[in-house]
Amino acid sequence: MSYRYYEMKAIEWGNQRGITRHSTGLAQAKKTQEELNELIEALEVGDKDARDDAYGDILVTLIMGAACEDTDLVVCLEKAYNEIKDRKGWLDSSGTFHKQ
């Protein structure tokens, strides 16, 4: 299955529960932050199941936020990729990329 398939399934799920009609991009961003904190905790302790769960939950909250804001997350990804595709920079010792 493709990313787009699961994105649409997540939006259907959100529609059925009223999230896309009654939530907001801000509320979903706050949920994304909660899930990001769970991801950080999972990575710190090396819990692969919790890591995978958190990545999935982050994606769902991003999809819900984009749907609440009536924007297409794939279009957002395309714009971001086009912005970074030719970016130059360096990777520091912690693994963080810094643009020039």
Image: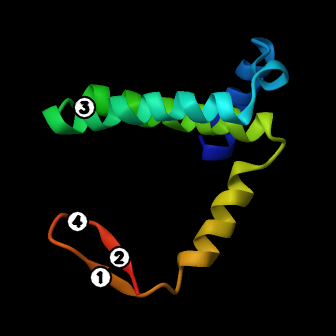
10 Å neighbourhood of mark 1: few (<14), some, or many (≥20)? few
Q: Amino acid at mark 4?
A: Gly
The quarter of the displayed image where residue 82 is located: bottom right
Which residue is under mark 3? 42
Which residue is under mark 1? 90
Q: CA distance from mark 1 to mark 2?
A: 5 Å
Which residue is under mark 2? 98
Q: Amino acid at mark 3?
A: Ala
Q: Residue at x 75, y 20 (%)?
A: 19
Mark 4 / mark 3, whichever is N-terminal: 3
Residue 95 - label: 4
Q: CA distance from mark 2 to mark 4?
A: 10 Å
- Where is 98 relative to 18, above or below? below
10 Å neighbourhood of mark 2: few (<14), some, or many (≥20)? few
Q: Quadrant of the C terminus?
A: bottom left
10 Å neighbourhood of mark 4: few (<14), some, or many (≥20)? few
Judge from the rendering whether residue 51 lies leftward or rightward of residue 47; answer left or right: right
Residue 25 - label: none
Mark 1 / mark 2, whichever is N-terminal: 1
**SS of the residue under disc 3:** helix
Look at the image and tell me whether residue 52 can be seen.
Answer: no
10 Å neighbourhood of mark 3: few (<14), some, or many (≥20)? some
The quarter of the displayed image where residue 74 is located: bottom right
Look at the image and tell me whether residue 21 can be seen.
Answer: yes
The quarter of the displayed image where residue 75 is located: bottom right
Mark 3 / mark 2, whichever is N-terminal: 3
Q: Residue at x 53, y 80 (%)?
A: 85
